[in-house]
Image (tube, rainbow, N blue to C red):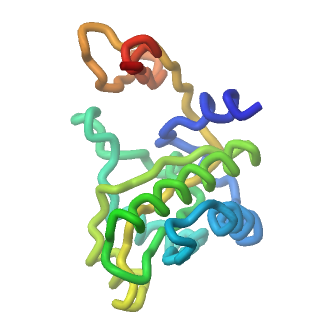
Amino acid sequence: MIRDMIVKNRSYRRFFQNHVIGTSLLEDLIDLARLSPSAANLQRLRFKICNTEEENEKVFSTLSWAGYLTDWKGPEIGERPSAYITILSTEKDTGKVACDAGIACQSILLGAVESELRGCIFASVKRDELQKLLKIPKKYSINYVIALGKPKENIKLEYVENNDIKYWRDENGTHHVPKRKLEDIII
């Protein structure tokens, strides 16, 4: 059921790094994005797959992890993503491209959930550095990076209290994500 998939589709940041994600599965996830709606059907998005140790390390080095967890610099070796999909566009980011990229991210992550994987979308990326490291031609702009892997952490949804939306981890490593109540967001 779609609701169950959306609830499972959280921002996972710790994975079983040794779990291999094959190129064909990553292509299947990108195919979901390809089949998704696109503003004016212009289909401006392109995708770069990384699923080797060498490429993954390059991508990892350009990402900022979990802004609210100020004492955590990201997953340690052994807990890092097994693959990345970098979402590119054929022109500078416009509203239409941003909309398409958001839809593509959600489609890819829902496909990952269906495949027993999880992921995290990164907008905080050292784009110029990543473009050079992956030898991405300058005609493309980097929109987002999606980290993917077999999840190694537990995530618990809970209600926002005192208007505090910051996620946090407890002493057992469970990642808590406050969400507003439905009646608080419908006007």
Relative horizontal placement of residue 71, taking residue 132 as reference (left or right):
left
Vertical placement of residue 41 versus 123, above or below = below
Task: Name which quarter of the figure residue 38 lies in.
Answer: bottom right
Q: Residue at x 53, y 77 (%)?
A: 42
Q: Position of residue 68 (x, y in %)?
A: 26, 33
Q: Nearer the viewer, residue 154 or 32?
A: 32
Q: Position of residue 65 (x, y in %)?
A: 34, 47
- Report the quarter where the C terminus lies: top left
- Report the quarter where the N terminus lies: top right
Q: Nearer the viewer, residue 37 or 144?
A: 37
Number of numbered labels in the structure image? 0
Vertical placement of residue 78 versus 7, above or below = below
Q: Residue at x 52, y 46 (%)?
A: 79
Task: Name which quarter of the figure residue 41 lies in.
Answer: bottom right
Vertical placement of residue 142 versus 98, above or below = below
Task: Name which quarter of the figure residue 43 lies in.
Answer: bottom right
